[in-house]
Amino acid sequence: MKDLLTLADLTPDEMRHILDLAVAIKQDWKAGKDTPYLKNKTLGMIFQKPSLRTRVSFDVAMLQLGGHGLYLSPNEIQLGKRESVADVARVISRYVNVVMARVFGHADIVELARYADVPIINGLSDYSHPCQGMADFLTILEHKGGFQGKKLVYLGDGNNVSTSLLFGAALLGMDYTIATPRGYELHPASWALAERLAAQTGAHLEATYDPFAAVRGADVIYTDTWTSMGQEAEAERRRKIFPPYQVNREKLALAKEDVIVMHCLPAHRGEEVTDEVADGPHSRLFDQAENRLHAQKAILVWALDAEPQG
Ligand code: CP
Ligand code: NVA
């Protein structure tokens, strides 16, 4: 079964392959060509949390691929509350061809994948956001032309998004530096996994507490909200700790002249990124959001072995 629970589930070849597929599918989309690779297929979309990008881009992706997306809101399925995750997996597998789920605890998506007979795609968990990562590396490929020898710098929380960037960079041979406050680092097990992948590609991976040292020579500066969904009770405390990690004019001045700025969105403008930077000439925030559509089409086509022939 081709599940995508984290980018670290992929080999470097699979990661490149899905990116190449995304590039081709996007080209066709731009040329107005139909790509009905998932004709009559149905995607079940289970959400435990709110969403704009994930919900809309998966729904539209299925429509444009000739299939159908079925939105299941947090109130409907109530994963693990109304019935067990295993039973949800067993039942939904009888109706749909593939499932995308956005969950709080990563264990829930692992459990879904364990009991489902169809591919499971992680649409965000507390540990990982692989669809975001795929769209982000597509964006970097388009704007930087490649990954080797390029420096991706993430400032802020060691969270699901920065973990996915760590794995993606390791798979693609891109250098990655993450600067977090003390106590908000990425998990040591994620580093161990990423280092094993990086040994195959030559990616240089680094962690620091110094955001100014981190951004020196950056080709890409990336940030995300300081408080993720589910951590709202910590928001006040985090607002006091994270300001040195804000992406602003001073940080950009230390990076390469042609640095691009990325953010998975939604943004808390004025916190992790200033308006000036988010709306400035280096920002690629909305290209990145668009690329969710193209990257996820490629993930769906890959997961369902529906790749265009010839
Ligand atoms: N970046 C992202 O996943 O956005 P949503 O939470 O709106 O889906
Ligand atoms: N880290 C954020 C990403 C949102 C797309 C969260 O989990 O809320």
Image (spheres, rainbow, N blue to C red):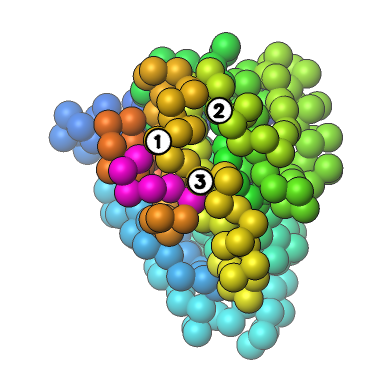
Residue at disc 3, CB closer than 8 Å to ligand 2:
no
Circle on res. 246: 3
Residue 9 located within the stretch drawn in magenta: no
| Left or right for 58, reference 75 | left
Classify 10 Å Cα crowding around label 3: few (below 14), some (14-19), many (20 and above).
Answer: many
Q: Name the foreground residue: 20 vs 254.
A: 254
Image spot of residue 258 (x, y percent): 37, 19
In this rendering, position of residue 97 left or right of residue 265: right
- The magenta segment: 272-277
Q: Which mark is residue 215?
A: 2
Amino acid type, callout 3: Gln
Which picture quadrant has residue 122? bottom right
Please tell me whether mark 1 sits on a helix, a strand or a loop.
Answer: helix
SS category of the residue bearing label 3:
loop
Q: Position of residue 68 (x, y in %)?
A: 34, 60
Whole-number angstrom distance, CA of label 2 to CA of label 3? 11 Å
Placement of the C terminus among the 4 image quadrants: top left
